[in-house]
Image: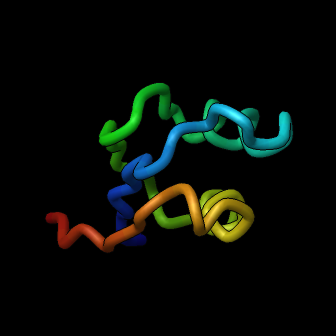
Amino acid sequence: MGQLKITLKRSAIGKPGKHKKIIAGLGLKRTSQWVILKDTPEVRGMVNKIPHIVDVEPVSGD
């Protein structure tokens, strides 16, 4: 399985509570912060719910 680099590009201020929980579930707290997570269906589903808030790019890992 690959990995994804997920970057928070917009603030969660003013967003619905559900979106804030998804952001927290991904491990993001501040704008411009990024995390590297495994590319699983669960992570993809979370990212697909908030594509306007996060940037996603694949990471070529060994």
Q: Nearer the viewer, residue 6 or 52?
A: 52
Quadrant hosting residue 47: bottom right
Q: Nearer the viewer, residue 19 or 2?
A: 19
Q: Position of residue 53 (x, y in %)?
A: 55, 56
Q: Position of residue 35 (x, y in %)?
A: 36, 43
Left or right: 52 with respect to 18? left
Residue furthest top in the image: 29
Quadrant hosting residue 23: top right
Q: How many marks?
A: 0
Q: Nearer the viewer, residue 22 or 59?
A: 22
**Which residue is painted at 51% across and 32% down in the image?**
27
Left or right: 54 with respect to 51? left
Query: How is the protein colored in the picture?
Result: rainbow
**Which residue is painted at 74% across and 64% down in the image?**
49
Q: Position of residue 60 (x, y in %)?
A: 19, 72
Quadrant location, the N terminus: bottom left
Task: Look at the picture and state if 19 lies above or below 48.
Answer: above
Q: Nearer the viewer, residue 21 or 52?
A: 52
Left or right: 18 with respect to 27? right
Residue furthest left in the image: 62
**Which residue is painted at 14% across and 64% down in the image?**
62
Q: Position of residue 41 (x, y in %)?
A: 67, 69
**Which residue is painted at 31% across and 73% down in the image?**
58
Residue furthest front in the image: 14
Left or right: 57 with respect to 27? left
